[in-house]
Image (cartoon, grey):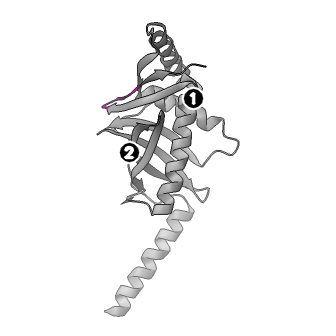
Amino acid sequence: MRSQILALFVVAATLIQTFSCCNAIPIGGPQPPHEIAPSEEAIQKLRERWKEALDVSPDGAFDIAITETEMTALANKALATIEEPPPIENLQIHFQDSLMNIYATVTVHEALPIPAMVALSVSAANGEINVSVKEAEFGGLTSMPSESAMETVTNIFNDLVDQIIQDEIGKNVAITDVQIEEGKMTLSGTLNAE
C-alpha cells in the first residue's frame, strides 16, 4: 500500500512539473468582481472633477471621489513609468468592504501567470495617506504575509498611492480623511499654502 501511495505522489509530482513547464497547469486564484478597462479618458474625468472641486472651495477644503476605473487607470499609468516594471499584468483596483483590493496577474519564472490580490486598508494621518496590507492571496493561497514582507509590500503600495495622489492632485495638499465605499474612494483634505 505504501509503495502505491509513493508511486501516486511521484506521478502527481511529475504531472505538475510537466504542466507547469508548459504553462498548462490550471491554477485558481482571486478574480476581480468585474473587469475594469483603464483609459486616459478616466484620468481626464478625474482631473476635471479635481479642478472643479478646487474652484468652488474658497477655503481650500476639498472632497474628491475617485472611482475604481480612475484609480485603475492611474495605477496602470504609474506602473508604465517604472523603468523595470514588476511582472504583473491586468492590474485592477476595486473598492469594496472598506478596502482597496488590488487584483493582478503575476508572472512567475517568466512562464507561469498566477492571479493575485492584495487587500489594503487606506487611512489618513498627518496630512498623508497611509496604506496597510490586510490580506494577500496568490494563486489559491490566502495568507497574511510575514511581518517583513508586509512592511515591504506596505511601503511599496504607500509609495505608489502617494505618487498617484501627488501626480494628480498635487504635492501641496493635506489629506485629512479617506472613506472607501463600494466602487469609490473619497479623499478629504485641504490645500496647503504654496
Task: Locate the N terminus by quadrant.
Answer: bottom left
User: 38 or 167: nearer the eye?
Assistant: 167
Labelled disc at residue 157 = none
Q: The residue tagged with tag 2: helix, strand or loop? A: loop
Q: Tell me which label, 1 or 2, sits earlier in the chain.
A: 2
From what the image shows, is residue 155 above or below residue 78?
below
Q: The residue tagged with tag 1: helix, strand or loop? A: helix
From what the image shows, is residue 144 above or below residue 122?
below
The residue range painted magenta reads 181-188
The percent position of residue 74, horizontal first and vertical second, equals 53, 29
Please check the rendered image and state whether residue 193 is part of the magenta-colored stretch, yes or no: no
Task: Locate the C terminus by quadrant.
Answer: top right
- Residue picked out by circle 2: 31
User: 174 or 180: nearer the eye?
Assistant: 174
Q: Residue at position x 60%, y 60% from top?
A: 109
Q: Is residue 143 left or right of residue 17?
A: left
The percent position of residue 54, horizontal first and vertical second, equals 48, 12
- Distance in Å between CA atoms under marks 1 and 2: 29 Å
Amino acid marked by disc 1: Gln
- Residue picked out by circle 1: 166
Q: Is residue 179 left or right of residue 162?
A: left
Q: Residue at position x 41%, y 34% from top?
A: 35
Q: Nearer the viewer, mark 1 or mark 2?
A: 1
The percent position of residue 155, horizontal first and vertical second, equals 53, 49
